[in-house]
Image (tube, rainbow, N blue to C red):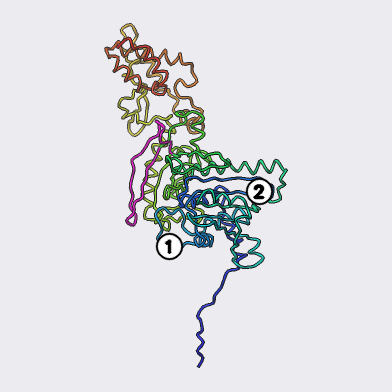
Amino acid sequence: MNNKIQADFDLVNPDPSALVESLRSFGYSLEASLADIIDNSIVADADDIQIQFTWLGEKSKISIIDNGCGMTEAELINSMKPGSKNPLDERDPKDLGRFGLGLKTASFSQCRRVTVGSKAEGNNIVIRRWDLDYINQCKEWRLQRIDPKEDNIFSALDSMGHGTIVLWEQMDRLVKGADKDDRKRENLFYKHIDKVKSHLSMVFHRFLEKQNSVKIQINNHPISPWDPFLKNHTATQHLPVEPIYFRGEKITVRAYVLPHRSKMDDQTYEQAGGPGGWNARQGFYIYRNNRLIVAGDWLGLGFRKETYTKLARILVDIPNSMDEYWKIDVKKSVARPPPQLREDFQRIARLTIDPATAVYRHRGRMVERQTAGDFVFPWNTNVRDGNYFYTINRKHPLIASVLNDPIQNKKKIEAMLRLIEETVPVPAIILNNMNNPDQILRPFENSPSEELLVVLEEIWNSLRDSGIDYNEAKRRIISMEPFCDYPQNVSVYLESKENER
């Protein structure tokens, strides 16, 4: 009798050299790779993260140093193992990873040799290295042990007490064949810093915004947070927070309509556009544990990135327990809502796009003219049989004062107003606003301030002559178009009228 058990499977081990080269092809950019490394630093409770670009021609290197809790030898070996985590396992709510691939794939995409040194409190420095050329030679998954004395960079861990250093060398995709004295290649190498800085300021802006939280520096220059929603700008519209529940867990959604170009100075407008510019940055912003995953996308919900919708940005907070349902990828750059939530997100998108389009097309006016309340407009919007038409507001203080002046020929003035109303070039205005929206001047834009003050003076006198007291006249002027767009000019003028109190 044959006691040998016949297995019903074949054990097929992947070829290390072939697989490790495949792991280089996940499509990481340099900035996305560094963000993946920083994820690990933040999970390790680091509050000081230093990125160093060092030019040495073909031997140039990039290092990431953090003061997190560090790792023991066993923990470091496990973290260096491709697929060190099962994405189906329940994870710590603060965990920013998913597949246990980030450190490896992010590093392999940029270099052929990644060395990680770490020191946990009360432990010795431990260092391990993946060298792709060495793996190709030995045809085995040999994780090399490195002596701390081999590179002075790791001696910093002794003075830190605890922390981790990730070192990228042999960066063939960034500096292959570069000569150390090639100034053009050197400038190109350091130019990458700007793109990395911009990306990290966006991805980790919530961590950077918190006081006494995380500090990230590149070559000793601190990174400042980039707020996609301009939350502190007075003209930003904050739509109500909307909680959505899925599989017993909460997703928090809050939409923002950003200010019109005319409400921002050049520097604010340029910064608020963000990496890629205004059109690229519209849509949903998906955050997982405060880390930005998707920075402006309509998530395949049927909306396009149009110029007139570029002021719509929607914040979405999801827990990491929903990664599978949101289809979070290895690079943490793609997310799609579960099919059960598509209608909710389409509804929220429409509710944000409508006011964003109105602000874009109506020069930043955040209130509807027909329900404007305290706002006083020279023009009325009317609807008859489903058609829109526009009339001059006879109740406007200046217009009313002229019409009520017994010296004036009221019949001629009415005829003039009707002529203006009936000949407003609406089609041309619409066409110009669609084709060249940023080239249409707002009222009194680029005009001498004296011209604005002449009109302001006449309206002020009309209000006061009608018996309205100082405080009420001041309130109306402040909320009246176009003076509401020129608060500084109005403030100076009203100060000159203090004696009328």
**Which one is earlier in the sequence, the residue at label 1 or at label 2?**
2
Residue 252 belongs to magenta span: yes
Q: Position of residue 72 (x, y in %)?
A: 50, 59
Q: 139 or 308, which is in the foreground?
A: 139
| Amino acid of disc 2 | Ser
Q: As displayed, is residue 344 above or below residue 465?
A: below
Q: Which residues are magenta?
A: 229-256
Q: Position of residue 258 (x, y in %)?
A: 43, 35
Mark-to-mark CA distance, 1 and 2: 38 Å
Q: 476 or 147, which is in the foreground?
A: 147
Q: Nearer the viewer, mark 1 or mark 2?
A: 2
* Mark 2 burial class by Cα count in 10 Å: few <14, some 14-19, many 20+: many
Q: Position of residue 145 (x, y in %)?
A: 59, 61
Q: Residue at x 42, y 12 (%)?
A: 454
Label 2 residue SS: loop
Residue 489 belongs to magenta span: no
| Amino acid of disc 1 | Leu
Q: Position of residue 439 (x, y in %)?
A: 51, 28
Q: In this figure, which residue is indicated by the disc labeled 2?
A: 60
Q: In this figure, which residue is indicated by the disc labeled 1?
A: 88
Q: As displayed, is residue 216 above or below residue 260?
A: below
Left or right, 98 with respect to 386, comes to right
Q: As displayed, is residue 52 above or below residue 259?
A: below
Residue 19 quadrant: bottom right
